[in-house]
Amino acid sequence: MSKQSTSISSEVNVLKAFQSVQGYHLGPSLIDVDDYETSDGYQYSFYVMEYISGETLHDFIRRNGMSG
């Protein structure tokens, strides 16, 4: 979720590129892209993707360090 729709668009384009590779599952599936407007007029763009169970980013960094 972001106030910067261009940032979301870039990420969505990468996810769509992953989906277009035939015969291979390269990452989580993109489910939907939309916008949310708050009651005070702020607009946020967001996307929904497939949940993949695994290690949290915090745990990964704690185990591997910042330079991983």
Image (cartoon, helix red, strand yellow):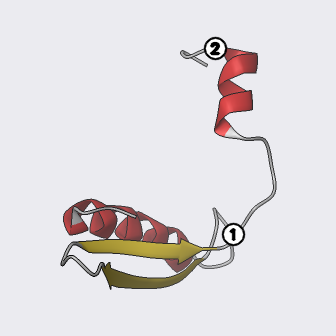
Depth check, mark 1 against mark 2: the one in front is 2
Pick the residue in front: 25 or 46.
46
Taking the image as shown, residue 11 lies to the left or right of residue 30, namely: left
Q: Does the CB distance between marks 1 and 2 fall below 8 Å?
A: no
CA distance for labels 1 and 2: 28 Å
Q: Residue at 27% of width from left, 59% of height from top? A: 7
In the image, taking residue 61 as reference, residue 52 lies left or right, namely: right
Q: Residue furthest front?
A: 40
Give coordinates of residue 4: x percent, y percent.
22, 62
Q: Position of residue 64 (x, y in %)?
A: 70, 17
Instruction: Give the labeled residue for mark 2.
Output: 65
- Residue occupying the point 59% across, 73% down: 49
Quarter placement of the C terminus: top right
In the picture shown, does residue 7 fall above or below 68?
below
The residue at the point 80 percent across, 49 percent down is: 54
Crowd around label 1: few <14 · some 14–19 · many ≥20 (10 Å): few
Q: In which quarter of the image is the N terminus?
A: bottom left
| Residue at position x 50%, y 78% in the image | 20
The image quarter containing residue 11 is bottom left
Element at label 2 = loop
Residue 4 drawn above or below residue 39 = above
Amino acid residing under circle 2: Gly
Disc 2 packing (10 Å; few <14; some 14–19; many ≥20): few
- Pinpoint residue 40: horizontal percent, then vertical percent: 21, 76
Question: Element under label 1?
Answer: loop
> To which quarter of the image does residue 12 belong?
bottom left
The residue beneath circle 1 is: 25
**Location of residue 63 with respect to 37 vertically, above or below:** above
